[in-house]
Image: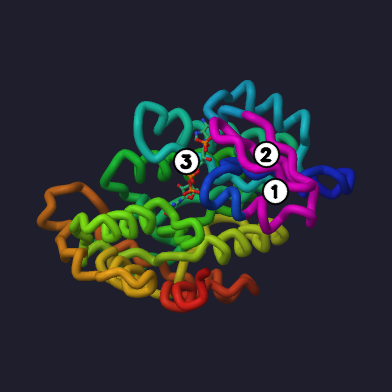
């Protein structure tokens, strides 16, 4: 890689640095390497050794300008939009701009992708699975993968699943906890299976992967496939809330176009990485 000629102070750059995953990567990497956190609207709390810069990853000229100026040795790209008018520009095209710039400056690129680009009908999925998404978000993440593979063939493309955190809770867990606390009944699908991963494990795995030359798709997720309903019940019990406020629903019967079983086969990551990917139950047991 062209990173060999870089000065030791050349930074790691994390996009989405105020987000759920990006902020945990920044927290774990701070003090180990000079860090630049790319932010968009939210302003994170200052951290020693971390500088934050605003960038719209959907603006190709701005991406090229910033990356050519900073010349980071590593880029971990987490920024995205899940929905709305910016989906294509930010999630798909933005990933392509970052990948193009990474190749031009010889930076090691880790691109964060998602299990929802799969069709959900042929689980478990190993790394050879081809995207066949059912909804716009999955299609945008599939297009992002295509653009990254095209512009930066040496990049690692990490397919992950529901990212969990308890303190503070990730948005989905927070919604479940708040609903139960306020006695608002909720329905969770029994036939939507995911491979939940603890944010600490995923961030550590991405940091480890950034120090390898692994290229191509890698599944990095939890080893315990669970339905959203099973996750909700486990979470409620762990928090000391009555799980009977959660009803069982069916994704199939809902009429929504959503992938059902996206179980990821994580055996390759378990062989390649020292970072242990804990099950949902293991993480719940020790989460603060
Ligand atoms: N969360 C999950 O369960 C899950 C599951 C599978 C895959 N993933 C993937 O994991 C990655 C990280 O997810 P996350 O949950 O950490 O997301 P998140 O908390 O929503 O963070 C996304 C970040 O992207 C930033 N962003 C939005 N538009 C931008 C733009 N135009 N330019 C620059 N930055 C922009 C946001 O900045 P502001 O904060 O300023 O708005 C935000 O900090 C994503 O690529 C996602 O597809 C997530």
For the residues bearing labels 1 and 2, Cβ distance under 8 angstroms: yes
Earlier residue among tags 3 and 1: 1
Q: Going by the image, does 246 lie left or right of 74? A: left
Q: Is disc 2 placed on a helix, strand or loop?
A: helix
Q: Is residue 46 above or below residue 21?
A: above
Question: In this view of the protein, can residue 73 be seen by the observer?
Answer: no
**The quarter of the displayed image where residue 281 is located:** bottom left
Q: Position of residue 21 (x, y in %)?
A: 54, 52
Q: Is residue 48 magenta?
A: yes
> Which residue shows up at 88% across the image and 48% down it?
8
Q: Position of residue 126 (x, y in %)?
A: 42, 66
Q: Is residue 24 magenta?
A: no
- Give the residues in magenta: 25-54
Label 1 to label 2: alpha-carbon separation: 7 Å
Which residue lies under the disc numbered 2?
102
Q: Is disc 1 placed on a helix, strand or loop?
A: strand
> Which residue shows up at 66% across the image and 33% down it?
101
Label 3 to label 2: alpha-carbon separation: 14 Å
Within 10 Å of disc 1 (Cα), the crowding (few <14, some 14-19, many 20+) is many
Label 3 to label 1: alpha-carbon separation: 17 Å
Which residue lies under the disc numbered 3?
144
Q: Position of residue 47 (x, y in %)?
A: 72, 47
Residue 108 tag number: 1
Earlier residue among tags 1 and 2: 2
Q: Is disc 3 placed on a helix, strand or loop?
A: helix
> Which residue shows up at 40% across the image and 51% down it?
171
**The quarter of the displayed image where residue 156 is located:** bottom right
């Amino acid at each position: 890689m062209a990173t060999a000629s870089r000065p030791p102070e050349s930074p790691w750059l994390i996009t989405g640095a105020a987000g759920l995953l990006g902020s945990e990567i920044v927290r774990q990497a701070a003090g180990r390497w000079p860090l630049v956190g790319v932010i968009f609207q939210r302003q994170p709390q200052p951290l020693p050794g971390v500088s934050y810069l605003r960038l719209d990853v959907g603006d190709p000229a701005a991406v090229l300008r910033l990356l050519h100026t900073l010349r980071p040795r590593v880029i971990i790209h987490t920024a995205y939009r899940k929905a709305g008018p910016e989906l294509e520009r930010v999630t798909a095209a933005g990933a392509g701009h970052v990948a193009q710039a990474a190749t031009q400056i010889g930076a090691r690129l880790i691109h964060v992708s998602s299990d929802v680009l799969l069709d959900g009908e042929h689980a478990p999925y190993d790394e050879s699975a081809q995207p066949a998404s059912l909804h716009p978000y999955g299609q945008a993440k599939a297009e992002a993968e295509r653009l990254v593979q095209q512009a930066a063939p040496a990049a690692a493309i990490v397919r992950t699943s529901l990212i969990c955190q308890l303190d503070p809770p990730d948005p989905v867990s927070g919604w479940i906890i708040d609903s139960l606390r306020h006695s608002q009944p909720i329905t969770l699908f029994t036939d939507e299976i995911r491979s939940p991963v603890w944010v600490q494990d995923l961030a550590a795995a991405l940091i480890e992967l950034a120090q390898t030359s692994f290229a191509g798709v890698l599944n990095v997720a939890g080893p315990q496939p669970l339905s959203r309903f099973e996750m909700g019940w486990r979470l409620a019990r762990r928090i000391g809330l009555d799980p009977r406020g959660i009803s069982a629903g069916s994704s199939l019967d809902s009429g929504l176009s959503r992938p059902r079983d996206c179980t990821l086969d994580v055996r390759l990551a378990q062989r390649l990485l020292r970072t242990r990917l804990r099950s949902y139950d293991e993480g719940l047991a020790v989460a603060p």
